[in-house]
Structures are given as C-alpha cells and as structure tokens.
Amino acid sequence: HDKVYDTLKWTYSKDYDYVYESLNTSNALGLGRINTEIAMTRDNGAYIAEKSDGYPTIWYRLQQVRGAKAGGCNDWFVPSICEIEKLRKAVESRAVSGGKIAGRSYRTSVFNHTWLYSSSEAFDETVWTWSHYSQHWFSDNKYDEASVFFIRAF
C-alpha cells in the first residue's frame, strides 16, 4: 500500500477550536503503532471522527484505510519520527527505491516533495513534521495541513 494522503490535520476541532492535549506519544523506533492506538482511542474516538471544517484528521483517514482493508490488511499505523527517519535514510542511501513513497531516487521520493506528519508529538500543540523544503524535522502546529503515509510493520 504505497499511498500518500494529503491535506490532513493531526488534531481535531471541538466547537470550532482545535484540541491541544498531550497524548504522550513517543519518538522511538518501533513505537508508531502504540502512538497510533493512543490517538485512535483518545477522547472516545474524537480524533477519528470526521470534522465539519472540511479537513479530516490523519487518524480519520487511517480509520478509512483500516476499514477498507487496504492491501487486504487492517493493521496500518502512522510511523513515529524515528521510523520515518530510518526509512528516509534508506531511500536516501538507495537501499530502498520504487513506488510513490520511495520514488526512483531520493529526488523523486515523498521526502523531497511533501510535508509529512509523524505520530510523534513535540509538545502539546505541535507534532514532529518533515519539511521537504529544508530537508529537516521541525515542530509544526497540529492544526496545520500536511501529508502522511501508513505502514504495517517496522
């Protein structure tokens, strides 16, 4: 399942205000799945509810992918910053190539063309996001729009 989902929010809105709360998600390698489950079950599933502001959350889109059993599977999750970084470095070193995410080369990969959300929070109001412009990670507002891809294992 080599798809990138665009124009999504990380957090949800409540009464037309965005919710800023710490979910205590981790940056660590191997913890993207746990980060995802924390967000998916928080606030009685509020993060996965479709929002009236026209911008679904990454968690809502993930719920759709899981429900549709994309690739025949329903265990997709949003990778942590360390998981994305490890994949990014593998693409950059040409150890991994092909598809929409990796491209034919790093230059054509998602890492060189898209802002990417991780499942790792930086602070209550921000999340670690990959900047394709500056080629580094930064702490971005949870209400900004960015892209995301889902993985099944790490």
Image (cartoon, rainbow, N blue to C red):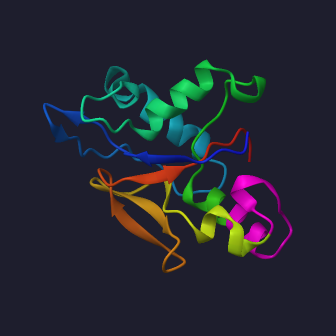
- Closer to us: 93 or 146: 146
Q: Is residue 78 left or right of residue 131?
A: right
The residue lying toward the viewer, choosing from 97 and 151, is 97
Residue shown at 66%/44% (left/top)? 3
Q: How many marks?
A: 0
How far from the left and from the top, in percent, is residue 1?
A: 73, 39
Residue that appears at 68% across and 66% down: 88
Residue 134 among those drawn in magenta: no
Residue 119 in sight: no
- For the question of whether residue 106 can be seen, the reply is yes
**At 29% across and 50% down in the image, what residue appears?**
143
Question: In the image shown, does 80 or 145 lie closer to the viewer?
Answer: 145
> Outermost residue, bottom direction?
134
Residue 113, percent from left and from top = 57, 67
* Part of the protein shown in magenta: 86-104
- In the rendered image of this protein, does residue 17 appear above or below residue 140? above
The x, y position of residue 153, in whole percent, is 74, 42
Q: Is residue 101 magenta?
A: yes
Residue 129, x across and y down, in percent = 46, 62
In the image: residue 102, left or right of residue 13: right
